[in-house]
Amino acid sequence: MTKKPVIKRQKEIKIRLTEEEHQALLERMEGAELATWIRNTCLEKKPNKQRKYKVADPQLLAGLGRIGGNLNQIARQVNTVVSDVEKIRAFAELASIRTQLQRILDNYDR
């Protein structure tokens, strides 16, 4: 087994950033370290594809799964209704539920 050569970095560059600039770099950064990301980006090295995933609340996921199953059952039942007026009412309700769920997910994903 060959050992990876240790890279000794002895040169240092200092820059000053505003809080907003620093935050913008942190939001764009891929990987765990800002210095590594800047080095890879500026020197055109391929960055490691490490995505940051939020930890999902298991209860939220389970609840959304149940809601999704219920919505599918409702949609299936609506498709069997003959009256166009009843279909429109049901689809309007489904659209309302979808909008509410999207708001919940948008707030959770911040």
Image (tube, rainbow, N blue to C red):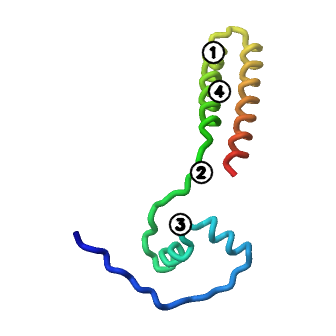
How far separated are the C-alphas under marks 4 and 1?
18 Å
Foreground label between 3 and 1:
3
From what the image shows, is residue 46 above or below residue 62? Answer: below
Query: SS at mark 3?
Result: loop
Name the N-terminal-most of marks 4 and 2.
2
Ranked by sequence position, the earlier of labels 3 and 2 is 3
Q: Answer above or below: position of 43 versus 104.
A: below
Q: Which residue is mark 3?
A: 32
Q: Nearer the viewer, mark 3 or mark 4?
A: 3
Q: Could you say where residue 37 lies in the image, as x and y percent from the top left? A: 52, 72
Q: Earlier in the sequence, mark 1 or mark 2?
A: 2
Label 1, label 2: how far apart the Cα atoms are: 37 Å
| Secondary structure under the numbered disc 4 in the rendered image | helix
For label 1, count other residues whose C-alpha is less than 10 Å away and answer few (under 14), some (14-19) or many (20+): few
Residue lying farthest to the top in this orientation: 82
Q: Which residue is mark 4?
A: 67
Structural distance between the alpha carbons of marks 4 and 2: 21 Å
Query: Which amino acid, mark 1?
Result: Asn
Q: Quadrant of the N terminus?
A: bottom left
Residue furthest bottom as drawn: 11
Q: Which residue is mark 2?
A: 54
User: Whole-Å distance between the Cαs marked 3 and 4?
Assistant: 35 Å
**Which is more N-terminal, label 1 or label 4?**
4
Question: Dividing the picture into quarters, in which one does residue 88 lie?
Answer: top right
- Spatial distance from mark 3 to mark 1, Cα to Cα? 49 Å
Q: Position of residue 64 (x, y in %)?
A: 63, 32
